[in-house]
Image (cartoon, rainbow, N blue to C red):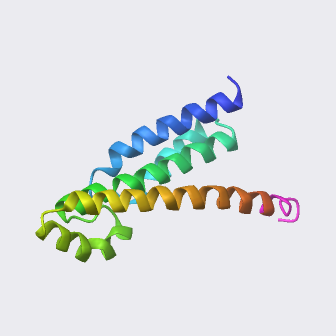
């Protein structure tokens, strides 16, 4: 299997898996992402495929953590704790769906900005690989 197909397959698997895990409140990133990423590495995936899996996992997990925070007032992870006051206010007003929509929209915009910047930064750091 080519590296590109394997990368796409692992990104889809990571996205689906961590979408389901992200809906469960309290599933910490370190406790869930690291073991699965280590499993992908130990299965012999090339570095590009591991990166694709990990980025898909991070993005999907953080987008789905908005659902328990906005709808139930239970923080999905530590990054959602500052949003609890705002979501509580919107829940009392009867519009938690607006909070959820805004949180997911912000996450998508953040991912569209952060992912290309991460790739550019990785490309820049790759120049110094032999030195380190």
Q: Nearer the viewer, residue 86 or 65?
A: 86
- Compared across the picture, whether 57 is left or right of 93 comes to right
Q: Nearer the viewer, residue 88 or 36?
A: 88
Where residue 56 sits: x, y (%)? 52, 46
Where residue 104 sits: x, y (%)? 38, 56
Please name the predominant secondary structure of the magenta segment in the image: loop
- Compared across the picture, whether 63 is left or right of 57 comes to left
- Compared across the picture, whether 81 is left or right of 62 comes to left
Vertical placement of residue 13 versus 93, above or below = above
Q: Residue furthest top?
A: 1
Quadrant of the rendered structure where residue 83 is? bottom left
Residue at left 27%, top 51%?
24
| Res. 107 in view | yes
User: What count of labels does the image hold?
Assistant: 0
User: Which segment is the magenta one?
Assistant: 125-132
Where residue 6 sits: x, y (%)? 62, 30
Q: Quadrant of the N terminus?
A: top right
- Compared across the picture, whether 38 is left or right of 26 comes to right
Q: Nearer the viewer, residue 44 or 72?
A: 72
Quadrant of the rendered structure where residue 17 is? top left
Q: Quadrant of the C terminus?
A: bottom right
Residue at left 69%, top 55%?
119
| Res. 26 in view | no
Residue at left 83%, top 59%?
129
Residue at left 44%, top 49%?
60
Vertical placement of residue 56 versus 122, above or below = above
Quadrant of the rendered structure where residue 89 is? bottom left
Where residue 67 sits: x, y (%)? 27, 55
Residue 15 lies within the magenta run: no
């Amino acid at each position: 299997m080519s590296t590109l197909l394997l990368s796409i397959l692992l990104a889809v698997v990571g996205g689906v898996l961590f979408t389901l895990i992200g809906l469960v409140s309290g599933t910490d990133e370190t406790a869930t992402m690291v073991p699965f990423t280590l499993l992908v590495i130990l299965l012999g995936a090339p570095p590009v495929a591991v990166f694709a899996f990990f980025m898909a996992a991070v993005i999907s997990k953080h987008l789905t953590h908005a659902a328990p925070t906005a709808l139930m007032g239970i923080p999905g992870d530590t990054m959602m704790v500052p949003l609890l006051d705002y979501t509580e206010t919107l829940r009392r007003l009867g519009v938690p769906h607006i909070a959820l929509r805004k949180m997911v929209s912000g996450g998508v915009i953040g991912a569209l900005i952060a992912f290309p910047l991460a790739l550019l930064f990785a490309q820049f750091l790759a120049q110094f690989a032999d030195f380190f």
